[in-house]
Image (cartoon, helix red, strand yellow):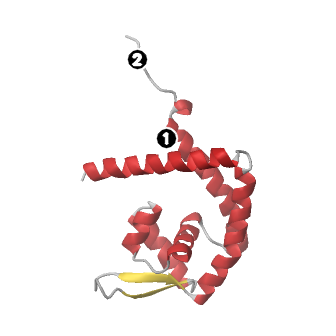
Amino acid sequence: MPQTQTRLSDFMPYRMAITSNAVSGLIAGEYRSEFGLKIPEWRIMAVLGDAGALTQRDLVRATLMDKVAVNRACKVLEDRGFVQRRPNALDGRSHHLELTVSGRELHGRIWPQAVQTYERIFAAITPREQEKLRAILDKLLKAARAIEGDDK
């Protein structure tokens, strides 16, 4: 009996994951060697640099990283003096995390490099294709979050 099976190379989630890993890996290589940050640590710094103070739960939602990875990255950043915690007035069980002055300075040094690498990679597609890609990614993320909400 013949089986219908999608080859891994044609499986879109796999292709998205390896492409994401390749892009993240290229950008990460620069800030890892120069600043000693791993991908999860930079992701936390990038989100905090963009959004301001957030709880770890907020960071899990924003990055889609698991709780353990977020906790570990926050601990490393706090130990290195790039992130500080302060009590959450709305929930005594959690804290807000925010970049320190050193964290903001480091973010300000890394961000332009990350953007420059991003621009080099994305020069492979036209601005119109970039817009389409953004729209498609937004739709896919929205669909995944809707399905995830259905499962709860």
Up-down: is 121 above or below 88?
Answer: above
Which residue lies at the image location 54% right of the left edge and 46% below the top edge?
17
Q: Residue at position x 48%, y 51% from top?
A: 138
Relative side of 4 to 150, left or right: right
Residue 68 appearing in the image: no
Task: State the mark number for residue 13.
Answer: 1
Q: Of 88 and 77, which appears nearest the observer?
A: 88
Element at label 2: loop
Q: Residues within 10 Å of mark 2 (few under 14, many from 20)?
A: few
Residue type beneath disc 1: Pro
Compared with 11, 91 (above or below) is below
Q: Is residue 63 left or right of residue 121?
A: left
Whole-percent x, y for residue 56 in the image = 40, 74
Residue 42, can we see it?
Answer: yes
Q: Quadrant of the N terminus?
A: top left
**Amino acid type at mark 2:** Gln
The residue that label 2 is drawn on is 3
User: In front here: 38 or 152?
Assistant: 152
Q: Is residue 52 left or right of residue 127?
A: left
Q: Residue furthest left?
A: 152
